Amino acid sequence: MDFEKLTSYFIFLLPVAVLGGCSTIAAHSDKEVTPSPYAGTHIAVTKTKRLWYEYDYYGQIMLSAPDVPFSFMADTLLYPIDAHRLNNITETSK
């Protein structure tokens, strides 16, 4: 693979990787959201479904659809932390 082709792939994939997982970051930074496993993926799928059926925002589906797999990967990495936080909340509420 030549350098120019590799550079073009990198330039294309860098913004996708940086912007990907935004729903997971939003779910973990919001203090009002109860910590649950795969909360970011749930938010990303809900947002993508909403934008799919709302035809007023044609271009936004292209920004929210790539967020689903990246949120899934980020939620998978954060699953032990979410499970521990959820376990602590359920034990303190008893």
Image (cartoon, rainbow, N blue to C red):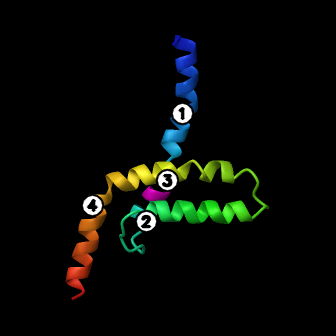
| Amino acid at circle 1 | Leu
Viewer-nearest residue: 82 or 76: 76
Q: Which residue is mark 4?
A: 81
- Direction bottom: furthest residue: 94
Marks 1/3: CA–CA distance:
15 Å
First in residue order: circle 1 vs circle 3: 1
Q: Which residue is mark 3?
A: 22
Marks 4/3: CA–CA distance:
18 Å
Viewer-nearest residue: 14 or 37: 37
- Give the SS element for disc 3: helix
Q: Which residue is mark 1?
A: 13
First in residue order: circle 2 vs circle 1: 1
Range of residues picked out in magenta: 21-25
Marks 2/3: CA–CA distance:
12 Å
Picture residue at 49% right of the left edge, 41% below the top = 18
- Give the SS element for disc 4: helix
Picture residue at 38% right of the left edge, 74% below the top = 34
- Is most of the magenta stretch helix, strand or loop? helix
- Give the SS element for disc 2: helix
Q: Where is residue 69 drawn, in percent x and y?
A: 50, 50
Q: How many marks?
A: 4
Residue 39: assigned label: 2
Residues at marks 4 and 3 touching, judged by CB atoms closer than 8 Å? no
Q: Where is residue 68 drawn, in percent x and y?
A: 53, 53
| Amino acid at circle 4 | Ile
| Amino acid at circle 3 | Cys
